[in-house]
């Protein structure tokens, strides 16, 4: 990308419309939303492979019963670190990267509202993730309590505990700064013609996500700070001996944790709502219901947290309340699924790679939603809880949903970002390999969970052997297929297939979004004067 | 960027930062909120940790409630701890005494605190102890073993749906933290 951008800037150097600085320093000090977007996306891609490698350690160990490759303690560090790296290092930063690149271009703004803070939040993210990764090399090993960091187990972590906690603080501050920036950009930087109800859904979903982040990251930071003081300063927030209660931690954690899963899915919904209309060649069906459904999901996400705690011994009234409240979420979520389907209905669909990933998302995310609904039934959840069934549930909502949509976004916008076309054949190969192997990987985990296989244990009873082997085979195919994506990204940045890429890239895309009215690749600075007319999904 | 946008940004950012700080505070506020909520509703099964006076109740001979006793030692501290019975059957309104035994397996003095918990949580407010080793820290001389009675009553107004109540104790080794040491 860098080569392309500099080419453009040679012609544009005035005193305030300056281009990027030269050399590597550019990336360290940049305040340009496109540069920072690129940094976030590349960092997220790197972490996707790091987290993926950890997942393969887990699946290698689970390939057969018995202990083969790693010690149980290290196995548990892997499940913990895999989750933390994927959530905080890959999925969240990838969406922040998309927000950086796309939000200003979608709302006709010259840049993010607070460019210097933008740079800082990226580098804090890097610092946070590096600190987290460093715990792998510490005495006593990386945290091995699961990503939920429940006490009293997590308090047995060795030297790594304070580092893991500080890394959560850094990641939290970084996300909050990113969120503030996104809200300020959307509220204060829109082109005058871009009224709220004309904004693309990606912008809407990010606006709501940003508010979620500001509300929940501080709560998580507080919870881990309490862990820190319990361990080092003699407080007893979660220590029964001193009058505390470990279940309190679970309440605080899930007050953060449940909305957190929506932080990863709402922008996913936004990108899907952006891509599907373009390849169905129709406006998005039910635009305003999509906006309201997003807001409803965000609101509900604050009042359902204890569905993660059905088995802690809540009274019946609590179980019932959290059960019904959780079921309510299926309604706005269903609205969205129906809207995407209706958008495709009778559309002139074509099936380029971004569309393939998006369609797979609609189908497979719905599967994850259904298992969620099953688990929301409190008495049934006693069977599913802490088994592989729930692992299957949330991987269906995260891998063939959030990750697939991130892939789709990559294919969809790479030609815009780089001015080069990616290789459609390899893209489709990547799609089919991923879509098939992801099901080989995660579908059998439903069976394992229903049959009673617990999660986060390195060994298992022999009756689980067959499906575990199938799942591991799927995992390795899935993992290695992702290298195709890496290859495509690198090749596209370096010049792609050589096909000419038009401004709108996809047929009639400029009807759907402002970004497609800009050149491909867009110059370093865009919309320094706001556009007068904006496209909407209401055509 | 024009001055107008700059000052709008400043105002908005200030508000958002304040929300973030308030939410950090809210996380901490959840601690007392939880305690009060649990006190009122008995959600987390905490029972009285100070003695209640022995009062006379109308004994309900028609009802039988199974009371189970669970004992555990936190972080496998070097002690044994058990109840004389795993369970007894009681009539609401009548007082019972059950003995618990604990032994310090080390040759050092040990200070330990037992933490009680009642399940189901909502039954805890009907379960009253007049005498319990959990009301204070217990000091064990090297190798000492103790017999510790617990006297309790299940109140007659215990709602119908509760047929079994589990009383569990966990001993925490507090030797390092305790003032009695
Ligand atoms: C219709 C929507 C959904 C419903 C009704 C639902 C319901 C549930 C329930 C009841 C659990 C707890 C299961 C247990 O621990 O026994 C759960 C766990 C989980 N869900 Fe969902 N869910 C839904 C959508 C989602 C989405 C969209 C995501 C993520 C993008 C997600 C991610 C997770 C995760 C990560 C966990 C497990 C957390 C852990 O224990 O580590 N869910 N879900
Ligand atoms: Cu949840």
Image (cartoon, rainbow, N blue to C red):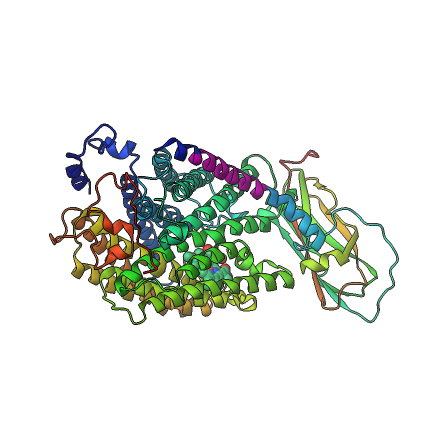
In the rendered image, the quadrant that contains the N terminus of chain A is top left
In the rendered image, the quadrant that contains the C terminus of chain A is bottom left
Q: Position of residue A469 (x, y in %)?
A: 33, 65
Which residue is at 29% across, 31% downward? A29
Total numbered badges shown on the rendered structure = 0
Magenta stretch secondary structure, dominant: helix
Q: Position of residue A533 (x, y in %)?
A: 30, 49
A212 or A375, which lies in front? A212
> Which of the 4 image quarters holds residue B161?
bottom right
In the rendered image, the vertical position of residue B146 relative to residue A431, given as above or below: above
Which residue is at 62% across, 36% downward? B176
Which residue is at 36% across, 56% downward? A402
Extreme-left residue of the structure: A498
Q: In screen coordinates, is A334 left or right of A152?
A: left
In the rendered image, the vertical position of residue A127 relative to residue A428, given as above or below: above
Q: Position of residue A255 (x, y in %)?
A: 53, 51
B10 or A312, which lies in front? B10
Extreme-top residue of the structure: A15
> Which of the 4 image quarters holds residue B97?
bottom right
Task: Reply yes or no: does residue B26 show up in magenta.
Answer: yes
- Is any atom of residue B105 visible in this view? no
Q: Write down the region rendered in magenta.
A: B8-28
Task: Reply yes or no: does residue A244 show up in magenta.
Answer: no
Q: In screen coordinates, is A306 left or right of A338?
A: right
A10 or B111, which lies in front? A10
> Which of the 4 image quarters holds residue A262?
bottom left
Extreme-front residue of the structure: A532
In the rendered image, the vertical position of residue A104 relative to residue B129, given as above or below: above
Q: Position of residue A172 (x, y in %)?
A: 44, 41
Q: In screen coordinates, is A448 left or right of A519?
A: right
């Amino acid at each position: 990308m860098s080569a392309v951008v500099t080419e453009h800037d040679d012609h544009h150097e005035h005193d305030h419309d300056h281009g990027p600085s030269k050399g590597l320093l550019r990336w360290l000090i940049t305040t340009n939303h496109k540069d920072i977007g690129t940094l976030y996306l590349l960092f997220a891609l790197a972490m996707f492979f790091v987290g993926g490698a950890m997942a393969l350690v887990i699946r290698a160990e689970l390939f057969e019963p018995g202990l083969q490759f790693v010690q149980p303690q290290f196995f548990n560090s892997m499940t913990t670190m895999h989750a933390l790296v994927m959530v905080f290092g890959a999925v969240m930063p990838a969406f922040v990267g998309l927000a950086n690149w796309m939000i200003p271009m979608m709302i006709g703004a010259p840049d993010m509202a607070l460019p210097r803070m933008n740079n800082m939040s990226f580098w804090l993210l890097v610092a946070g993730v590096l600190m987290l990764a460093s715990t792998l090399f510490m005495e006593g090993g990386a945290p091995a309590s699961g990503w939920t960091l429940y006490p009293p187990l997590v308090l047995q972590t060795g030297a790594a505990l304070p580092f893991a906690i500080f890394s959560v603080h850094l990641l939290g501050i970084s996300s909050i700064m990113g969120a503030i920036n996104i809200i300020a950009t959307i509220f204060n930087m829109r082109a005058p013609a871009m009224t709220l109800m004309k904004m693309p859904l990606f912008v809407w979903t990010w606006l709501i996500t940003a508010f979620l982040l500001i509300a929940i990251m501080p709560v998580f930071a507080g919870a881990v700070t309490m862990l820190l003081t319990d361990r080092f300063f003699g407080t007893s927030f979660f220590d029964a001996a001193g009058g505390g209660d470990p279940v309190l931690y679970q309440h605080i954690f899930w007050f953060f944790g449940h909305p957190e899963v929506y932080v990863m899915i709402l922008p996913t919904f936004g990108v899907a709502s952006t891509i599907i209309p373009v390849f169905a060649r129709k406006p998005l069906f039910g635009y305003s219901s999509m906006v309201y459904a997003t807001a409803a999901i965000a609101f509900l996400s604050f009042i359902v947290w204890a569905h993660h705690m059905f088995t802690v011994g809540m009274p019946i009234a609590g179980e019932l309340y959290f059960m019904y409240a959780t079921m309510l979420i299926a309604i706005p979520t269903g609205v969205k699924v129906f809207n995407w389907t209706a958008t495709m209905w009778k559309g002139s669909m074509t099936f380029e790679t971004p569309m393939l990933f998006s369609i797979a998302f609609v189908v497979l995310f719905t599967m994850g939603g259904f298992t969620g609904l099953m688990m929301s039934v409190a008495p049934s959840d006693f069977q599913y809880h802490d088994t592989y069934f729930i692992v299957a549930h949330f991987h269906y909502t995260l891998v063939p949903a959030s990750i697939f949509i991130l892939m789709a976004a990559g294919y969809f916008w790479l030609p815009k970002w780089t001015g080069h076309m990616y290789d459609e054949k390899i893209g489709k190969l990547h799609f089919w390999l991923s879509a098939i192997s992801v099901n080989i990987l995660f579908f059998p985990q439903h069976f394992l969970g229903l049959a009673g296989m617990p999660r986060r244990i390195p060994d298992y009873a022999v009756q689980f052997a067959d499906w575990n082997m199938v799942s591991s085979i799927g995992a390795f195919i899935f993992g290695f297929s992702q290298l195709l994506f890496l290859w495509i990204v690198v090749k596209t940045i370096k010049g792609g297939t050589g096909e000419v890429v038009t401004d709108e890239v996809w047929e009639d895309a400029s009807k759907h979004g402002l970004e497609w009215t800009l050149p491909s690749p867009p110059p370093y600075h865009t919309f320094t004067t706001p556009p007068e007319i904006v496209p909407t999904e209401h055509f | 960027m024009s001055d107008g946008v700059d000052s709008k940004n400043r105002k908005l950012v200030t508000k958002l930062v304040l929300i973030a700080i308030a939410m950090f505070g809210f996380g901490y506020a959840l601690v007392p909120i939880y305690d009060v909520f649990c006190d009122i509703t008995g959600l987390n099964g905490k029972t009285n940790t100070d003695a209640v006076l022995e009062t006379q109740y109308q004994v309900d001979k028609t009802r039988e409630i199974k009371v189970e006793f669970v004992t555990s030692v936190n972080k496998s501290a070097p002690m044994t701890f058990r109840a004389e019975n795993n369970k007894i059957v009681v009539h609401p309104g009548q007082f019972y005494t059950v003995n618990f035994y604990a032994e310090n397996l080390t040759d050092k003095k040990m200070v330990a605190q037992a933490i009680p918990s009642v399940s189901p949580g909502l039954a805890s407010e009907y379960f009253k102890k007049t005498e319990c080793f959990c009301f204070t820290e217990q000091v064990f001389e090297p190798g000492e073993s103790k017999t510790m009675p617990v006297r309790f009553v299940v109140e007659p107004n215990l709602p119908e749906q509760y047929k079994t109540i589990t009383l569990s104790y966990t001993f925490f080794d507090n030797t390092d933290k305790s003032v009695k040491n």
